Image (tube, rainbow, N blue to C red):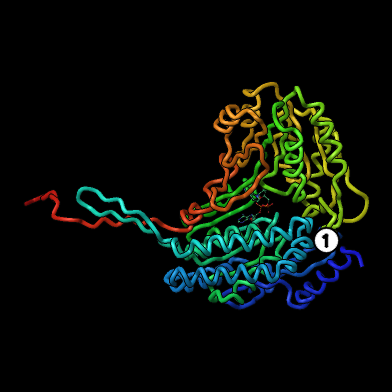
Amino acid sequence: MSDLDTNLAKLHRHLIRYADTGILNQIDGQPVPAQSGAWFDTHSPVDESHIARVARSGAADIDAAARAAADAFPAWRDMDGTARKKILHAIADGIVARAEEIALCECWDTGQALRFMSKAALRGAENFRFFADRAPGARDGQMLPSATLMNVTTRTPLGPVGIITPWNTPFMLSTWKIAPALAAGCTIVHKPAEFSPLTARILMEIAEEAGLPPGVWNLVNGLGEEAGKALTEHPAIKAIAFVGESKTGSMIMKQGADTLKRVHFELGGKNPVIVFDDADLDRALDAAIFMIYSLNGERCTSSSRLLVQDSIADQFEEKLAARVGNITVGHPLDPKTEVGPLIHKVHFDKVTSYFDIARQNGATIAAGGTVPEGAGHYVNPTLFTHATNDMTVAQEEIFGPVLTSIRFKGEAQAIALANDTQYGLTAYVWTNDITRAMRTTAAIEAGMIWVNSENVRHLPTPFGGVKASGIGRDGGDWSFDFYMETKHVGFATGHHAIPRLGA
Ligand code: NAD
């Protein structure tokens, strides 16, 4: 049996359990369908085959989940941080134990290649361990003595929070948002993306098997404009942590205005990778390719705009086109596959529409621009060259394995082009001139910049974007700043003079 056949056989053994039940919500520790009895279907991007029916929830389900989260909050908030730490580590253990199942299901549900998803499952476990270890210190504050007062700060968890996640690497992203919320002492209602509901259900089961009390983490499936909207409007929900498109973030801000929701947004990007002629060009090439063609290009931090110095552009683009044409497109469960099918027909249509747009824009299609024959939402890795930054293909987030290459003359132009976008999530700079690296990183408008490196996450560092790419930061203590309130208490240290009115 080939590796692919072995993986398919394993996958189908995992999927059988959803055949009768469908993918249910989990509210107050109970697996439940939508109160209305409505369902929607989820299909695999590999061949459009039916995976399962999924609870299509609405405002009543969100209300039940929010109430459960509110009821569970005081006990979870008051639980000793070391006890929360133990439960979060047990969740990480559960993820590791089911990592293969998670990876196989994630690939089938999203089209992501197994070579990346097996690592994504383990990274999800690491997210839980990282925040587990910080749970006991989450309330820690500062002592800020003045002449007359001992000023003390402490942090308290916000309350029940809503977490809304997208379909690209949904498992990893869910752990990234949920683990810090739980470590902080918040309770949760999670609404996963409708295109990829499978692994959110597995994660939820792992959490409750690990000893998480009922109601601390509630899962509600459904469509964005139904369940998602109701979650953002619910008065018991104190904050919304959202990962998704910039325009959805803007809708959520409006929807949450009446209940004064605190929001944390991780949104879209059109991230530049700037390659100067003094860089290590072989490493720059590897990194540029990895950052746009891994994860099917469905990656918020992808380097989707190549800004290449014109003195080296011909040679760099030639090597790039050859490598792009050589990327292995195939079944996501085949370990050899580098690029799998795109998540959904709707997204496939969006990504492939840019092939014609590139032609109309006047760019050259140097690789790809086509789709392989056969079923599934597959596209060939694509490279547009001779583009200019004002073209649609240089400005819009395509969110597929599609790279737009733009040439620049010198440093000032590279910086201007990098910043000439509505987005500001990440940037990548390749140069061996340290002073140039310092000048460019200071001038580029982005939340995260890597110099002579692809995106390598280090969990204590801040993650987030500027401009239309987001509001707020995750990672390290920044996550706790979002999920907690900082409280100040001043203790008088003596009998300081109090102004006496009417005395
Ligand atoms: P999306 O905005 O369409 O959907 C994300 C989630 O929001 C889904 O669960 C959806 O059901 C929900 N939603 C939709 N409308 C809603 C509404 N009116 N109210 C409440 N919830 C609603 O995004 P997507 O297409 O699933 O994901 C891709 C996008 O996510 C890309 O733009 C990508 O760049 C972005 N993303 C950003 C980061 C980051 O860290 N900055 C990470 C991953 C993905």
* Residue at 83% over, 66% down: 7
* Residue under pointer 1: 333
Give the percent coordinates (x, y) of residue 462. 54, 48
Please, is residue 330 above or below residue 95 in the view? above
Give the percent coordinates (x, y) of residue 315. 82, 28
Mark 1 is on which residue type?
A: Leu
Residue 277 or residue 185, whichever sits in front? 277
Please, is residue 247 above or below residue 484 in the view? above
Please, is residue 259 above or below residue 27 in the view? above
Q: Which quarter of the figure has residue 52? A: bottom right
* Residue at 50% over, 58% down: 239
Task: Report the number of numbered marks.
Answer: 1
Dot 1: element: loop
Give the percent coordinates (x, y) of residue 472. 52, 48
Label 1 beta carbon less than 8 Å to ligand 1:
no
The answer to whether residue 238 is visible is yes
The answer to whether residue 38 is visible is no
Where, quadrant-wise, is the N terminus in this rendering? bottom right
* Residue at 55% over, 68% down: 88
Give the percent coordinates (x, y) of residue 273. 69, 35
Residue 157 or residue 396, whichever sits in front? 157
Residue 374 is left or right of residue 283, and the answer is right
Residue 454 or residue 185, whichever sits in front? 454
Furthest toward the left, the residue is: 503
Q: Which quarter of the figure has residue 282? A: top right
